[in-house]
């Protein structure tokens, strides 16, 4: 089907259809919706102009914890990678998405956003949206997911502690139930512990946010844990502070693995062993998705990248149990 046929069915000019597909602001919403509906029904996918190089970065609105650390590192990688591809960047908070109706852009990248907020994306915009660190909503053909392998990331951390002789692990996942990757990480930690025959219970694996984090560290210490695994958010900083309050030394009294924080982890005392996402690769794949649309190619809708373990000095090497 050609653009001219879409115009005939929508009872508008081909120029108007072209403006709809290039997301020109001077098109009435009723016309825009009619053209999109016809294009979707006929399976028509317009070719985006290679001259249109604006990419919108959509960031969380009011509350950005516990994904702030991921947000900062993903932003750094995207603001380096996209300009290399000759893309121009516009930053938009997620609570101001209505502005998308008045700007022209060839793609968008949302970091740590709620996927449910984008379930209507294909009906509103003929351009790709890439969700960083989240899964795409079902039945959204031009919404892509680029994320890290949470199960693999949790497993390499638990595996490292186990290999170093730790046998009673306390784990705090930064976040609350039903939000972000918190539940996925908790389930993955439980699976990794069970696979190695280590103790698993709700008291040893908990979810926590800032206001209860230090208290939960204390509860785990009372259970006699010999190691802490604290993924997400700024857990490495908060945990180091909490352990100082409880007069516990790392790694002499307790081993610790957290999520990588580029401005803190290697400067902590001692430098912290961490797991880290490949933020550069995340940014590169996001840019690849948008470029593929401009060239009429299509990449897989979901890409999963492995975590890496950065070994430093916060995990002791304990003697094997008798």
Image (cartoon, rainbow, N blue to C red):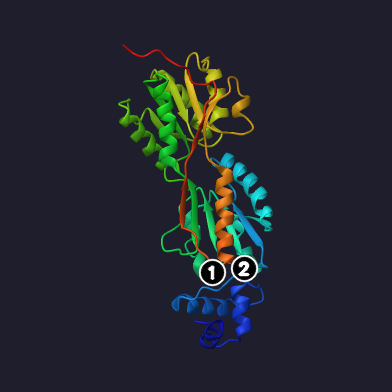
Residue beneath label 2, please? 101
Q: Give the Cα distance between marks 1 and 2.
A: 9 Å
Image x and y of residue 1, in percent:
49, 81
Q: Is residue 299 visible?
A: yes
The circle drawn on residue 30 is: none
Residue 313 image-quadrant placement: top right
Q: Earlier in the sequence, mark 1 or mark 2?
A: 2
Image x and y of residue 310, in percent:
53, 30
CB under 8 Å between discs 1 and 2: yes
Residue positioned 42% across, 63% down in the render? 139
49 lies above or below 42: above
Nearest the viewer among 304 and 34 is: 304
Residue beneath label 1, please? 124
Element carrying mark 2? helix
Residue positioned 64% across, 67% down in the render? 50
312 lies above or below 180: above
Q: How many marks?
A: 2
Residue positioned 64% across, 32% down in the render? 263
Element carrying mark 1? helix
225 lies above or below 148: above
Q: Is residue 195 left or right of residue 284?
A: left
């Amino acid at each position: 089907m050609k653009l001219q046929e879409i115009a005939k069915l929508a009872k508008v000019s081909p120029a108007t259809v072209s403006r709809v597909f290039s997301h020109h602001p001077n098109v009435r919403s009723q016309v825009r919706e009619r053209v999109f509906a016809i294009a979707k029904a006929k399976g028509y996918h317009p070719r985006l102009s290679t001259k249109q190089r604006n990419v919108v970065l959509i960031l969380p609105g009011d509350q950005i914890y516990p994904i702030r650390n991921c947000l900062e590192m993903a932003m750094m990688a995207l603001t380096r990678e996209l300009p290399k591809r000759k893309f121009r960047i516009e930053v938009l908070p997620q609570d101001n998405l209505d502005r998308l109706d008045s700007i022209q852009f060839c793609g968008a990248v949302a970091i740590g956003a709620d996927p449910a907020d984008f379930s209507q994306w294909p009906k509103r915009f003929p351009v790709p949206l890439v969700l960083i660190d989240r899964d795409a909503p079902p039945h959204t053909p031009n919404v892509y997911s680029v994320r890290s392998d949470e199960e693999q990331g949790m497993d390499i951390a638990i595996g490292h502690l186990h290999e170093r002789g730790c046998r009673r692990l306390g784990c705090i996942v930064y976040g609350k139930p039903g939000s972000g990757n918190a539940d996925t990480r908790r389930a993955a930690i439980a699976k990794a512990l069970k696979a190695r025959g280590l103790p698993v219970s709700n008291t040893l694996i908990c979810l926590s946010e800032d206001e209860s984090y230090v208290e939960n560290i204390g509860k785990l210490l009372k259970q006699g844990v010999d190691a802490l695994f604290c993924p997400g958010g700024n857990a490495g900083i908060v945990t180091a502070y909490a352990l100082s309050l409880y007069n516990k030394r790392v790694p002499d009294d307790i081993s610790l693995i957290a999520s990588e924080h580029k401005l803190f982890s290697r400067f902590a005392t001692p430098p912290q062993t961490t797991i880290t996402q490949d933020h550069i690769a995340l940014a590169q794949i996001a840019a690849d998705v948008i470029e593929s649309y401009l060239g009429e190619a299509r990449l897989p809708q979901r890409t999963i990248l492995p975590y890496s373990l950065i070994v430093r000095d916060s995990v002791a090497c304990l003697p094997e149990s008798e």
